[in-house]
Image (tube, rainbow, N blue to C red):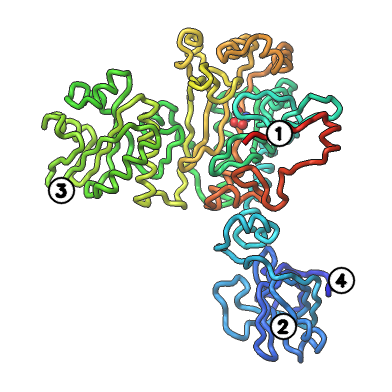
Amino acid sequence: MAESMSGMKRSHRCTEVSSANIGENVTVMGWVQKSRNKGGIIFVDLRDRSGILQIIFEESDCGQESFAKAEKLRSEFVIAVEGRVEARSGGVNENLATGAIEVRAKYLRILSESATPPFPIEENSKTKEELRLKYRYLDLRRPDIQRNLMTRSRVATLTRAFLAEEGFLEIETPTLIKSTPEGARDYLVPSRVHPGSFYALPQSPQLFKQLLMCSGYDRYFQLARCYRDEDLRADRQPEFTQIDLEMSFVDVDDVLDVNERLLKKLFKEVCNVDIALPIQRMTWQEAMDRFGSDKPDLRFGMELKNVSDVVKNCGFGVFTSALAAGGSVRGINAEGQGHMPRKKIDALVEYAKGFGAKGLAYASIGEDGSVKSSFAKFMTEEEMAALVSAMDGKPGDLLLFAADKNKVVYDVLGNLRLELARQLDLLKKDDFKFLWVTEFPLLEYSEEEGRFVAMHHPFTMPMEEDLQYIDSDPGRVRAKAYDIVLNGVEMGGGSVRIHQADIQSKMFEVLGFTQERANDQFGFLLEAFKYGVPPHAGLAYGMDRMVMLMVGADSIRDVIAFPKVKDASCLMTEAPSAVDEKQLKELGIEIAPQED
Ligand code: ASP
């Protein structure tokens, strides 16, 4: 039996009712969280997105008809209640915002009944995520997810207000665009009108925002949905949202300045975190040398040390051969971990191998200063002492070393550092450490493709002083590119763009594009650059990640209303799905038989 609500009007959300309303009549509507019949008196916890309010039904107040309905209430029934606010009779419930009051019902309507939900609607659900995502509309009723989405909405609202105040225009760019794959794989949409032709869904609004600068819009932003068809790693979504912006007549400092003020406002108003400005800056090279990562987590130390010079003449072949091959030997000092049992160290070695290490050399320093080491027999006492001293090793410390190509050494020690921090519980969720990483390399050599690829994207401006190396030593050229990192997570990134057609053509050449292919894919941009381009620069945040960090969620799925799972499917709607033969025919598409 579902009744209409005609003649009733909600006066308050559940937790908008407070002690200030005692003695007043209110009308509240929402879902039954739970209902307890204590014989002649029925207690109902009523829930809406604001929280929970206790309602009391007694036949003498609400009459026989409403009481009979109240007896039928089950979890997730939707009801409307009119009643009087009273001080709570059974003592104050400190756990509830409305714990000091209750509503004595005078009148009840059941607006909708509910089948028994497949899992309880409660905070910190223990239900398996697959089941929750299949019934996402029920999962979204849970208070923790509701809070996350409210935070997300607040981030959007504050961002819009701040950027508008700073003179940014919100402009939408198309989501059916030309495919220009460079970076991730595009999602393609077949065209019915042009059989055999495809649109792509944008990986970002990059080219359009640059064109908007060409058109004089000067400061643009958009909360933009972006799509990347990647083999999904643990915490990626095929579609995600960027806070995307672009500015004209600016250089690196101008972009960083406006963005750190935006971050300061967001983090203050949303999570009461004070960011001291300016945010610390570090070049990419320094980040790699000190933390083995281009997104260092600054909540703890354990920095990398380059000991190549110290060990270059030692007797340990693993060290010297890595150096001879042009690599390096670096280490980290896990302070106070000298007592770590062999089994745990072996597990760390295995962990390091997962990042390409052939092994891991270690030395534990006893409380008496004696050194126990996996490679002691290859070193003289003096050599070992010099190494320990270079690592600031003190009694009780554990030193871990990697010797390999620089890339491997960084990767191994950077990850080992994080793994140790996790094991030692050094990563506090309420500690927010922001960092700008700047001067990224412009290019990165891809073994897979046998050519240089853009580290950020092909429109990123090289640093002027490095332009001279672009032909002779492309790997050496640094870019005017920057990332904003929070607690080891890349929250956003951007760059100053190339606005000179000749440098842009050069860039395409270095990336191995023929003139023809550059024209075919990006001709409209190169053409636009012929008609007066302002110098411009921009940045985009991963909004999902940002909100995830703000609310301390473990997964970005917890801050997206209807997320997809690892294989890019939606468990609720079962997308993607097969389509009608007729639809395919209209598109001129035939499905090739699948090989296993
Ligand atoms: N479009 C870039 C990205 O998605 C961000 C930017 O350079 O503004 O990473």
Vertical arrangement, residue 103 with respect to residue 558, above or below: below
Which quadrant of the render holds ligand 1? top right
Callout 2–callout 3 Cβ contact below 8 Å: no
Residue 225, numbered label: none
Q: Earlier in the sequence, mark 3 or mark 1?
A: 3
Are dots 1 and 4 in contact, CB under 8 Å?
Answer: no
Instruction: Give the Cα separation between the discs numbered 4 and 3.
Output: 77 Å
- Number of the front mark, 3 or 1: 1
Q: Which mark is residue 367?
A: 3
How far from the left and from the top, in percent, is residue 410? 38, 31
Circle nearer the viewer, 4 or 2: 4
Q: Which kind of residue does numbered mark 3 sit on?
A: Glu
Give the distance between the C-alpha atoms of the residues marked 4 and 2, in whole angstroms. Answer: 22 Å
As drawn, which residue projects farthest toward the right?
6
Earlier sequence position, callout 1 versus callout 4: 4
Q: Residue tagged by mark 4?
A: 4
Give the CA distance from mark 2 to mark 3.
69 Å
The crowd level at tag 2 (other Cα within 10 Å; few <14, some 14-19, many 20+) is many
Give the amino acid type for the residue marked by disc 4 in the picture.
Answer: Ser
Instruction: Indicate the secondary structure of the residue bearing disc 1.
Output: loop
Badge 2 or badge 3: first in the primary sequence: 2
**In the image, the residue with mark 3 has its CB under 8 Å from the nearest atom of ligand 1:** no
Dot 2 or dot 1: first in sequence order is: 2
Indicate left or right for 286 with 4 as reference: left
Closer to the camera, 495 or 510? 510
Answer with left or right where residue 406 lies relative to residue 524: left
Which image quarter is the C terminus in? top right
Amino acid at dot 1: Pro
Q: What is the x, y in percent for residue 174?
A: 76, 31
Q: Which residue is mark 2?
A: 104
